[in-house]
Amino acid sequence: MADSQNSPTREQCLYMAKVAELAERYNETMNYMNKLVRASVYPTSELTSEERRLLSTAYYRVISMHRSAWRKMRSLEQNNDGNTNDDLVLVQEYRARIEADISEICDGILKLLDETLIPSASSSESKVFYFITKGDHERYLAEIKGDDERREAAEKAMQSYQTAEQIALADLPPKHPRRLGVALNFAVFHSEILKACESGCSKARLAYAAAHSDETQLPEELQEESAAIMQRLRNNITFWDAQRTLEDYAVHI
């Protein structure tokens, strides 16, 4: 009989992931979900919607802290008022450490997706979910990389989002949270990575309009999530429209 401490069951991993999430120890949530995936999913099973949510939330929380730290270091470098060259070198070295952490986290989830989660996915909803997640983490890599590595990460993110979009448009109704999620994150990618704000805004606007006129009756558990993503799309559209107005104004001054 296996030692439960060395080989926790799927149920034990799930329970402890939820406990760690409740304690806001997201690194541990991430680790428990990694164990769950590697031990019990491919090729005999796939994640439930609850397990997907836990995995996604854990990685999002962990990577968000690192992305925030990276942005602060970049700001400190660019606004180097009153700091010595030695100070700047220290900040650059610290940023490099953060970049290494971001790369490690992203590489971990991308490997999990490519080797286990995507091959195990059978439903369109789960496939879209995983390709969105893949695109997101390739986008996070593009944020921190330079030149050729940035271009490579951006191209991979584009491919992942396009795959998610193709499946979503073919198989999911416009109001479905996964289809809306593709539109939201793909639009952000266009705006922030490709610097194509107009293209991103157009993509978001089309998705919002389609969902707004969609009469599909979603299951109750999806309705709240759908409404929340629609609101985020609306907020982003408003923000991008305002940005374009400011840019047009600046051009004509």
Image: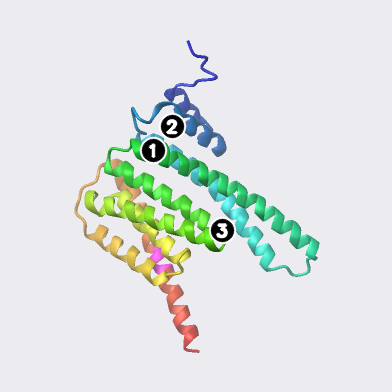
Magenta-colored segment: predominant secondary structure: helix
| Whether residue 200 is situated above or below residue 129 in the rendered picture | below
| Whether residue 174 is situated above or below residue 248 in the rendered picture | above
Q: Does 237 appear in magenta?
A: yes
Image marks 1 and 2: residues in contact by CB distance under 8 Å: yes
Residue visible at 23% across and 48% down in the picture? 171
Residue identifier under label 3? 145
Q: Is residue 205 left or right of residue 194?
A: left
Residue 80 placement (x, y as % from top left): 72, 67
Q: Secondary structure at mark 1?
A: helix
Residue visible at 22% across and 60% down in the picture? 213
> Which is nearer the eye, 36 or 152?
152
Image marks 2 and 3: residues in contact by CB distance under 8 Å: no
Residue identifier under label 1? 117
Residue 179 placement (x, y as % from top left): 30, 52
- The residue stretch that appears in magenta: 235-239
Q: Badge 1 local density, few (<14 within 10 Å), some, or many (20+)?
A: many
Q: Badge 3 local density, few (<14 within 10 Å), some, or many (20+)?
A: some
Numbered label attached to residue 40 = none
Amino acid residing under circle 3: Lys
Numbered label attached to residue 37 = 2
